[in-house]
Image (cartoon, helix red, strand yellow):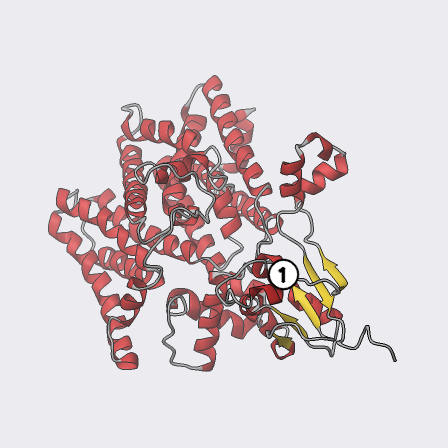
């Protein structure tokens, strides 16, 4: 039976196509799209390139490897969620192809297929795939840089073109986000060790990186007068992190262990590390593993490990958001899938069944993590457009934070001019989004915040409820929702607060004729 399953995925590129088909299915089922967060910033940057070429931008909008492709996408496909997500999605597909290819070359078709399954079912990847994600672009570029270097390490030949190419890709990743500089720790360790190709040849990587950065310095110097414009923005943005309010939903114990707890306890990773740590250690250290595969596993582990240490050490600059650990977790997926696939490919019948069962268990727990993810975090912001559509020709008021967060969907719907952000006036329609207006927020001053909350006498016109997720629908259809504790069912069935449309009574509504 295991041999029959193996024969389905081993010929040619069949394993790649099956893995990509699974990826496409998961992306479609777990589609997120607009999240009214960093994606809004990148879209603003994209429109900056379209409307103000040549463009510089500020924090976020200056990330050219995502804003420029997004601008092209908008020009080709128009303003919509798909066009916004497409650039980072294409980067991710490229990463998946590269990961499959190198694993197949080193370990064989079954490990490559198993690694692909482990990656595409990972909740962080499956959900981020349908978001305009700078994390994905950073990972794809750095992995491509790693791969060019690894090819040199495999042959023991310091191919200057490949090494310079690795530096260029790392430089592009640095333009994507400054955290890409963490890869310097990985390359620095190889440099210090003089690993395989001679110490000084690693400087070609640095040369490629500096060449890209130098072009940016020249461009920013010409455009702004400050070559370090982007660097200065990054240093003074979010300079302090309040660890007492953990927006990522982590367990906070102590800075030394908190990064590990992110990987062990967050739903974005499920049981991944319980598989990755023992299987990765076995793949890196066991003498039963061919030397070429051991070297591959060690380089993957070193790459992911260096990233983990750097992100953990930068807690004073970065919150412990699971997406910052994407490179570490994806390298863990690659190690885990490769190890399980190797056992499936080389082991006895009993070991093959155990490996196949392990892969199924990992993928199954990952699917649970995907199913419970909140796929509509910006429901209250996006639904403002639906309220405007329901009331054509009327102006609708809302709080300034919702209006700011919804600026991109409003632009796509050509409805921004119909939105008022002043406190609700008598006789007007007011859209109440509890997610933003229930308490003071970035664009809502504390002294006026109460004015944006429902008052006695307001007339409810419409209530907008988010659609239930796939798992909630399954519980409802099977009639098993009553088996869950009420608090868990509420969170599962209503992951996002509803939004409300009110009519503010006229001042003379209660006066006699």
Q: Nearer the viewer, residue 506 or 270?
A: 506
Q: Percent position (x, y) of residue 396?
A: 68, 73
Can you see residue 415? no
Which quadrant does the N terminus fall into? Answer: top right
Q: Secondary structure at mark 1?
A: loop
Q: Percent position (x, y) of residue 102?
A: 36, 44
* Residue occupying the far right of the picture: 513
Q: Percent position (x, y) of residue 93?
A: 47, 53
Image height of 289 relative to 44, above or below: above
Q: Residues within 10 Å of mark 1 (few under 14, many from 20)?
A: many
Q: Nearer the viewer, residue 201 or 466?
A: 466
Can you see residue 386? yes
What residue would you read off at disc 1? Answer: 433
Q: Residue at x 40, y 39 (%)?
A: 252
Q: Is residue 75 left or right of residue 237?
A: right
Where on the picture, by quarter, is residue 250? top left
Q: Residue at x 74, y 79 (%)?
A: 393
Which quadrant does the C terminus fall into? Answer: bottom right
Q: Is residue 30 left or right of residue 285?
A: right
Q: Residue at x 38, y 52 (%)?
A: 139
Q: Is residue 66 left or right of residue 483?
A: left
* Residue occupying the far front of the picture: 512
Q: Percent position (x, y) of residue 362?
A: 50, 32
Where on the picture, by quarter, is residue 424? bottom right
**Total numbered labels:** 1
Q: Nearer the viewer, residue 317 or 334?
A: 317
Image height of 142 relative to 418, above or below: above
């Amino acid at each position: 039976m295991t041999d029959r399953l193996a024969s389905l995925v081993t010929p040619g590129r069949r394993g790649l196509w099956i893995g990509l088909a699974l990826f496409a299915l998961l992306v479609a089922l777990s589609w997120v799209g607009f999240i009214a967060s960093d994606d809004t910033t990148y879209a603003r940057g994209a429109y900056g390139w379209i409307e103000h070429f040549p463009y510089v931008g500020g924090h976020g909008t200056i990330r050219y490897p995502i804003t420029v492709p997004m601008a092209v996408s908008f020009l080709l496909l128009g303003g919509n969620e798909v066009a916004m997500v497409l650039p980072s999605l294409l980067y991710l597909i490229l990463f998946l192809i590269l990961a499959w290819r190198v694993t197949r070359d080193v370990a064989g078709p079954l490990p490559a297929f198993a690694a692909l399954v482990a990656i595409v079912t990972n909740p962080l990847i499956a959900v981020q795939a349908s978001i305009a994600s700078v994390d994905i672009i950073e990972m794809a570029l750095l992995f491509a840089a790693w791969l060019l270097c690894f090819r040199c390490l495999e042959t023991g030949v310091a191919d200057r073109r490949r090494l310079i190419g690795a530096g260029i890709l790392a430089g592009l990743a640095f333009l994507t986000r400054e955290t890409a500089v963490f890869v310097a720790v990985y390359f620095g360790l190889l440099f210090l060790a003089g690993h395989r190709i001679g110490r000084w040849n690693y400087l070609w990587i640095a040369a490629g990186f500096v060449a890209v950065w130098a072009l940016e310095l020249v461009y920013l110097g010409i455009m702004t007068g400050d070559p370090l414009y982007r660097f200065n923005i990054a240093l003074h943005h979010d300079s302090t992190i309040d660890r007492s309010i953990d927006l990522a939903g982590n367990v906070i114990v102590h800075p030394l262990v908190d990064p590990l707890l992110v990987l062990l306890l967050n739903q974005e990773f499920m049981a991944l590390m319980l598989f990755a740590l023992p299987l990765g250690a076995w793949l890196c250290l066991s003498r039963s593993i061919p030397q070429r595969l051991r070297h591959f596993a060690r380089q993957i582990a070193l790459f992911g490990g260096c990233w983990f240490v750097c992100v953990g050490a930068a807690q004073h600059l970065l919150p412990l958001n699971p997406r910052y650990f994407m490179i570490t977790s994806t390298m863990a997926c690659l190690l885990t899938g490769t190890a399980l696939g190797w056992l499936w490919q080389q082991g006895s019948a009993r070991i093959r069944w155990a490996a196949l069962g392990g892969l199924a268990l990992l993928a199954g727990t990952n699917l649970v993590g995907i199913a419970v993810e909140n796929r509509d975090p910006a429901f209250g912001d996006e639904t403002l457009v639906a309220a405007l559509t329901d009331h054509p020709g009327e102006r609708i008021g809302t709080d300034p934070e919702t209006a700011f967060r919804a600026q991109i969907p409003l632009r796509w719907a050509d409805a921004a001019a119909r939105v008022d952000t002043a406190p609700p006036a008598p006789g007007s329609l007011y859209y109440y989004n509890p997610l933003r207006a229930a308490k003071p927020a970035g664009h809502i001053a504390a002294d006026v915040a109460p004015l944006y909350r429902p008052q006695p006498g307001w007339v409810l016109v419409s209530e907008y409820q988010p659609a239930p997720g796939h798992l909630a629908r399954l519980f409802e259809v099977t009639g098993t929702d009553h088996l869950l504790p009420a608090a868990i069912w509420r969170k599962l069935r209503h992951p996002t607060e509803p939004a409300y449309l009110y009519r503010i009574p006229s001042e003379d509504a209660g006066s006699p004729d």
